[in-house]
Image (cartoon, rainbow, N blue to C red):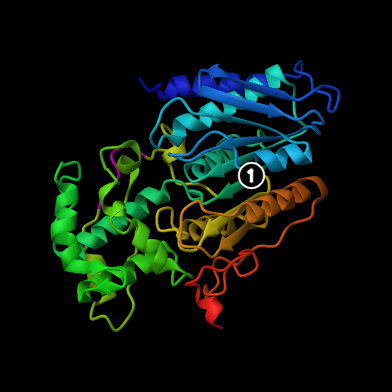
Amino acid sequence: MMPTARQLALVVAIALALATDPALSTAPAGDRGPISRRGTYAGGGYLIEVPADWNGGLVIFAHGTNGHEATPLASHLADKGYAWAASSFRSGGYRPDVFVVDTLQVRDLFIREIGRPRWTIIHGQSQGGHIAIASLELHPGVYQGALIECGVTDGVTIADLRLAYMAAAEFFAGVPLLDDPARPDLAARVTEQWLPALGEPGRYTRQGERFDSVVKHLFGGDLPLRLEGLRRFYLSNMIEFRRTQTLGRAGSTLNVRYRIDPGLGVDEDELNRKIRRFAPVAGARSRETNPVFAEPSGRITVPVLTLHETGDAFVPFGLEQSYRRRTLAVGTSHLLVQRAIRWPAHCAIDGDAREQAFDDLVAWIERGVKPDGDDVLATDVSKLGLRWTSILHPDDPARRR
């Protein structure tokens, strides 16, 4: 049984009280052998790794929906003298509201069993990006920085994008898909009715070209390798998103402005009038009762560095753009550095880019050296990521220049 909102709030309050208890001493660095611990706690299974020459830095890893609790930075952290800890989370599925608490608890566990770190960075992948941003916004002061890769950086907006994708798909295909998205024959209807009506990337029908134009704008613009990435998730994006699940219940297209390129025979204003709109379930994205599923505020107080593939059609790059706009609106954009990785995949960022980003984040936290990033809101997004992508994909248009 999932805990209630009041129970979650109590757990968080206890965790934060313990984490700030002055009686908990800072563990001295470098005076003990390496520590490796595995076990279970209220938030699921946990891992703790502390090198013999621990320098006092701690990384808390928040994995994705189908990820693993072992951080991909493990070897790099050990070489640099940093400790890390992670939780398996108490359940599967997309529940960042619960997993924020699990992540706070594993940090508290580290402090009680090992000692207080001099700083803590939260490192989130995919769903872990939602966990990281929610943790920073809702629990300021707990973490001193965040590294987010392929992440749901703009939180509940991922539900809006998935729902908007499906609404556009049914509109252009003329196939009702959202009346009963839980029906067991949904996959068959998608492949037998929707797919023939629209075609697929590289082999679109006329209606498919219109749909693709809308998706392009929803997901962040004419990004490098966007079509190559879309091929991988073209069908699954239609089938796997369920409005009956927690994330789906929070989805809303009420404020989505659909865009479409000129020359495709579709009037944009008419499209926005006629396409079906969907509201969230009452209370599903309430800041009072379920703040992790409310819209992010952009109010970060510590350095955040993100990495995101341009061709990610599962967790679209557009989430980086929408979160950048939030920080600009509230005056915190100076704390957000974003780097594009030119690749058509989800969470396939290479180790060198990840390790460089982590080292740059630490230098920013410790020495105030703000790293470089990309302008994700640039008018021309075709050049994003050239500096951070060590090996260009065979289909990258930059290879032909």
Image quarter of the C terminus? bottom right
Q: Position of residue 251 (x, y in %)?
A: 33, 47
For label 1, the residue is 146
Res. 283 in view? no
Main secondary structure of the magenta stretch: loop
From this view, report whether residue 74 is shown above or below residue 3.
below
Circle 1 SS class: strand
Q: Which residue is outermost to the front?
A: 394
Query: Residue at 76% of width from left, 25% of height from top?
Result: 34
Query: Residue at 56% of width from left, 24% of height from top?
Result: 46
How many dots with numbers?
A: 1
Res. 120 in view? yes
Q: Position of residue 59 (x, y in %)?
A: 67, 36
From this view, report whether residue 223 is shown above or below residue 115.
below
Neighbourhood count class around disc 1 (C-alpha, 10 Å): few under 14, some 14–19, many 20 upward: many
In this rendering, position of residue 37 left or right of residue 349: right
- Front residue of 398/221: it is 398
Q: Which residue is outermost to the right?
A: 31
In this rendering, position of residue 34 left or right of residue 399: right
Amino acid marked by disc 1: Ala
Query: Residue at 78% of width from left, 50% of height from top?
Result: 363
Q: Was residue 280 drawn as part of the magenta stretch in this picture? A: yes
Toward which corner of the image does residue 37 lie, by quadrant?
top right
Query: Residue at 19% of width from left, 49% of height from top?
Result: 187
Give the extent of the magenta segment. 278-284
